[in-house]
Structures are given as structure tokens and as C-alpha cells.
Amino acid sequence: MQEQNMPMEQDELMDNADLYTLVDEDGNEKLFELIDVLEENGQVYFALIPHIENPEELLEGEVELVVLCAKTDAEGNEILEPIESDEEYERIADLFIARLDEEADDEDEDSE
């Protein structure tokens, strides 16, 4: 899925911090949920998954992970853009996956 630039205002981030509407190359809108944010070498990255109303559905199969970077457009708005470099995308996705695995391991230890 190739996402288009989506403007986001700081107030919108605070009011609806977890949900983002992304538009694919065909103009289709899809709702995504923010699961993590990280900063690497001065660049901010967002990890999102498709929004699923029933969390139990997340356990039923694989989930698409979308990784986007935050940029500033010509008007000074912060936008989310796809990562252009495959190498950079893989590196950042691996960082997010490692962080998510670590969180899951911590939750497993807490429940024991």
C-alpha cells in the first residue's frame, strides 16, 4: 500500500492520537491505528496497523504494518510520507518489530 501525504495538525494528534486515515494510490481511504513512534537519527517514524474494531481479530492472523516518516510540507504542516528507501524501510520496520516483541515479552512476564 502506497500512502499519500496526510496533513496532521498538532491539535488533531492530541484529540485523536491513535487513529489516522491514510489514502492509497487509488484514492481509497483506510483507517489505521498508531501503535508506536520512534526517533532515529533525527527523523520521526510512525508504525501503524489497520484499525480493527474487535481486538480479538488481531489474534486471528497476520497484521499489516505500515511505517511512515514525519516530514514538513511547504506550508509548514507536518505530514506522514512513505519511506522511499527499501533499506531504510527494512531497518526502521525491524526496529519497530523488535520494540513490539519486547513489549509483548514484558506483558507475558507481568501476567505470570
Image (cartoon, rainbow, N blue to C red):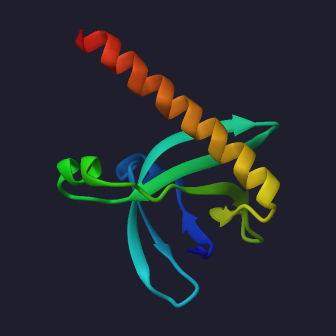
Q: Is 85 left, or right, of 60 in this rendering?
A: right
Q: Quadrant of the N terminus?
A: bottom right
* Residue furthest to the bottom: 26
- Camera-side residue of 7 and 60: 60
Percent from the top left, x then y, of residue 22?
48, 71
Question: Which quarter of the rendering shows the C terminus?
Answer: top left
Judging depth in this view, the residue of 39 and 58 nearest the camera is 58
Q: State the image coordinates of residue 56 (x, y, percent, origin top left).
A: 18, 48
Considering only vertical position in the picture, is 106 above or below 55?
above
List x then y, in percent, for residue 82: 67, 65
Give the residue at x 72% y 70%.
75
- Residue toward you, 99 or 23: 99
Q: Residue placed at 82% from the left, 36% from the top?
A: 41
Q: Position of residue 51 (x, y in %)?
A: 33, 60
Q: Is residue 103 above or below residue 9?
A: above
Most extreme residue toward the front is 61
Left or right, 58 with respect to 56, comes to right
The residue lying at 73 percent from left, 61 percent from top is 83
Location of residue 61 (image quadrant):
bottom left
Residue at image point 59% right, 73% down: 3
